[in-house]
Amino acid sequence: MFRNKKIGVLGTVNSGKTVLLTSLLWHLYEFSPGSFRIGKEKNAEIKDANPVYNLGNRDFNYTAYRRQFVEQGRWPDKTQDFAIARCTYNRTDSFWEHDVTFVDIPGERVSDVFIWQATDYADWTWKIERFWSGDTNILASMDAFKKCCQQVETTSASASESWDDLVKEYRNGLVALAGNFSPFITPSTFVLTIGGETMDGLSEEDIESRPIWNEGDFFPLPGKWRNSQNDVLRSLYERCESNFKKYKKTVLKPFYKEIDECDSFIVCVDIFNILASGLSRFYQVKEEINMFFQMIRPSKFGEILINAQKAMNYIGLNYLLPNFIQTKPPKIAYVATKSDMAISGNGKNRLEKLLGDLVRNVNNSSYVNSKLFTCCAGKTFEYDPDSNRIVFLTARGENHVPLDKCPELPTSWEKWDKDQYRGFLCEGIPLQVVAGAPPEQNNLDKLFDYITGDDD
C-alpha cells in the first residue's frame, strides 16, 4: 500500500531551497544511517529509493544539480518557474510504500496571489489599488504610472503611443519596487521569466526593453475605462484584460493547481541574509511569508470545517464527523537555513528565536500546524575557536579562507547593525561534497520526518 504526500518547498530571497531539496533527495537516494538519522529511535533506514520522472520540463533536475555539486563544486542554479521532484521509497520502520512529491515553488510567484484570487481583471485592479493605498513605498514607486494614466485620459495620443507610455512607467515602477526590496512585483514574470531568467546582471538598456510578460503585458488600469466612450481608453483596458486572462490561465493555473494539492509546506528563510541586508529586507521577507500564507489559506467554509474538527477532537466527539468532511490543516515547517553559520555563543537558539519572531503572526493561526527548524542542508562553514572565526571553502582546491569575525546573532529584531553581518553574504561549497559524498547536514533528517508525517 502506498502512503502519498505532496510537499511544497518555498524559499525567500537567497534561502537555498533548491540546495535543501537537492541535499534531501541525495540523502534518500544514497542513504547512510550514520549521516541521516530518522525514525523515533533514530535508527530507521530508507530502502529502494527511486526518482519518478514523468513531468517533462517540470521535473526537478536532481541529477544535474548533484553533478554541479560533485564535478564543479558549486551550488545548483536557480530553478525555472516551478519544478516537481517525485520519489518512492520504503522505510524499515513502516509497512507503507512511500510516494512523496516535492514542489519547488519560486518565491517570486507568490506576489501574483491577487491575480489568482481575483474573479476577473476588474476585481484584480480593485484589489491591487486597495493594497497600494496602504503602502507608501508602493505609492511612491507607482506615482509616475498613476500620473501617466491621468495623462492618457486627457491627451489625444493614439492607443499605440499610450500603451508604450503605460508599459514604460509601469515597468519603471516595478524596477523601483525591486530596488526597495518590495516583494510585491506583479506580474512576477518581470523578475522571473517562465524560462528562469532573472534581472540579475541586466544593464539599464536590457531592463528598459524587458517585457513585463513576454506573452503580453498588463497592469491595473482605472475601472471607468472599461465602458468609456473614448475608444483609446476602452481598447487599452480590453488589451490588459485579455492578457490578464491569458496569464492567469497559462502561468498561474498550473502553478496553483500544484500548490492546492500540497498537504504540507517547507518555508525556507535566510536569516543571515536579512541581518546583512537590513530592515528593508526584513519587511520584504515578512511580507513574502504573509502573502504565501494568503496563497494557501483555505476557503471560509474549509476554515470552519477545520475549526469544527478541532473542537470535536478536543471534546472527544470527532467520531461524529463524517469521514468525507474531516480534513487536516496544512503542516508547515519554517526553516532557518544555513544554520552552520550560527556557531558563536548561543547561536542556534538565537537563530530559532529570530525565525519564530519573524513568523509569529502566521504561527498563531488556528488552521496551520507548524514547527520551527534550524537546518543546514550542506555544511559549508567550520569554526575556529582559537580565533573566533568562521572559515569556508570558496572554490575547489583553494585553502580555507577566514572571515574577520564570527559575530553573535542579535537576541531580537528590534535593532542590529547590518554592517556587522556583511560576512554572512559569502558563499562557499559544502565541504564534504568535494569528496563526492552526500553533504553533511544538520536537522535535515528531523525536518524530513516532520514534514512527511513520519514523526507522528
Image (cartoon, helix red, strand yellow):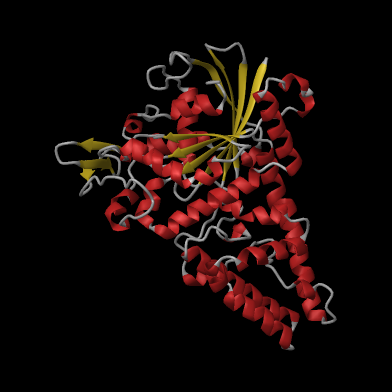
The residue located at (66%, 32%) in the rendering is: 54
Q: Position of residue 7 (x, y in %)?
A: 59, 33
Against 141, residue 112 (above or below) is above
Q: Residue 138: which quarter of the image? A: bottom right
Q: Residue 454: which quarter of the image? A: top right
The residue located at (32%, 29%) in the rendering is: 435
Q: Position of residue 117 (x, y in %)?
A: 71, 52
- Given the current orientation, which residue lies at the most extreme left position? 386
Number of numbered discs present?
Answer: 0
* Viewer-proximal residue among 441 and 198: 441
* Viewer-proximal residue among 158 and 36: 36
* Viewer-proximal residue among 53 and 307: 307
Against 446, residue 144 (above or below) is below
Q: Position of residue 18 (x, y in %)?
A: 49, 40
Quadrant placement of the C terminus: top right
Against 442, residue 228 (above or below) is below
Residue 157 visible to an observer of this rendering: no
Residue 275 visible to an observer of this rendering: yes
Q: Position of residue 106 (x, y in %)?
A: 56, 47
Quadrant placement of the N terminus: top right
Please indicate whether residue 202 sits to the left or right of residue 210 in the image: left
- Given the current orientation, which residue lies at the most extreme front position? 315
Please indicate whether residue 182 sits to the left or right of residue 229 in the image: left
Against 169, residue 191 (above or below) is above
The residue located at (60%, 75%) in the rendering is: 169
